[in-house]
Image (cartoon, rainbow, N blue to C red):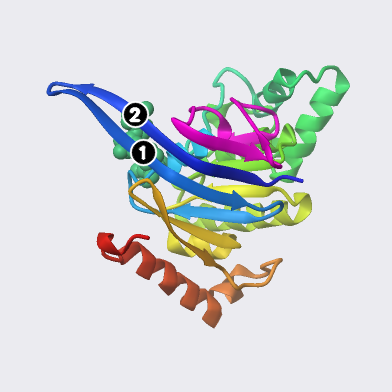
Amino acid sequence: MGDVSLVDVSKQFTLRIDTGLHTVHALRNVNFTIRDGEIAVLIGPSGCGKTTALRVAMGLETASRGQVRVDGRQVHGCGHDRGMVFQHAELLPWLSALQNVMFGLEMKGMRGSALRDTAMRYLDLVGLKDSANRRPHQLSGGMKQRVGIARALAIDPEVLLMDEPFGALDAQTRESLQAELLDIHTTTGKTIVFVTHDLDEAVLLADRVIVMRDGAVQEIIDVPLPRPRGDLGVVRGMAEFAETRYRIWQALHQAPGAVH
Ligand SMILES: Nc1ncnc2c1ncn2[C@@H]1O[C@H](COP(=O)(O)OP(=O)(O)OP(=O)(O)O)[C@@H](O)[C@H]1O
Ligand SMILES: [Mg+2]
């Protein structure tokens, strides 16, 4: 199992600036459950709380109010049941790709030959077996992101949280990583929460798209496309693809007063 819920989560940050203390309401009573094996996409304007929602779900930030639940259990702080992939892979520069993946496994307590074998298996899964000994500066942006994905998957989390993982990549690399992520999802059945600004990416990947605005969930939109998605070029040409994309666009462009 691997469902993850935010239950009535609010998060405030206090900022100290010239004019005194200011409260930022990054999340306001956010409620959603991402079901076991689902890919849910969070989308919304810059500053609407997507990263904060992910960081609270990961346990990197504490909610000011409300709960995070994994499989119905309330969780506090980080745990191996959740893994995160960041916009920039944030690899340790002095370690090879393989050692970066091994590092996460060591943190989990794995030792001996299983450590190397497991890390190699996940590098293979993301197509990097032949680059295992390269250090981060010897990898392209797309390869670094693949290492980040392998590192997060290797600890075998129930839930994978991905914050604009393909945002900094060129269009072609992005497309191939989208297809790879869908393959990995088909293979592993992981629950994935994925943040993006890209409407096409949202529709291609998601079972449901959660549209956020001003720290709140504005609308949750089902994506009526088959799983596995198959050829993404064909998917892009489907009427359901265009219709869903337009529905999300409309939700993003609704007048603020229309938020419910
Ligand atoms: N550590 C922090 N301290 C103070 N304010 C913060 C902090 N982190 C986020 N915020 C504020 O919380 C709000 C939500 O930020 P968040 O990073 O979650 O937005 P986002 O939807 O991920 O935006 P983007 O699309 O630009 O990545 C913003 O107003 C931001 O300035
Ligand atoms: Mg963000």
What percent of the width, then of the height, locates residue 223?
57, 69
102 vs 239, nearest the viewer: 239
Would you name the residue on which mark 2 appears?
13
Name the residue at 68% across, 27% down: 133
Give, as a single range, the part of the protein colored magenta. Answer: 57-85
Name the residue at 86% across, 25% down: 114
Q: Contact (CB < 8 A) between labels 2 and 1?
A: yes
Name the residue at 68% across, 24% down: 104
Residue 159 in sight from this viewpoint:
yes
Cα–Cα span, label 2 and label 1:
7 Å
Query: What amino acid type should be assigned to the residue bearing mark 2?
Result: Phe
Query: In the figure, residue 44 lies in which quadrant?
Result: bottom left
Query: In the figure, residue 23 lies in which quadrant?
Result: top left
Answer whether residue 68 is magenta in the image: yes
Query: What amino acid type should be assigned to the residue bearing mark 1?
Result: Ala
Task: From the viewer's perspective, tell me whether residue 208 is left or right of residue 12.
Answer: right
The response on whether ligand 1 sits within 8 Å of label 1 is yes
Residue farthest left in this picture: 19
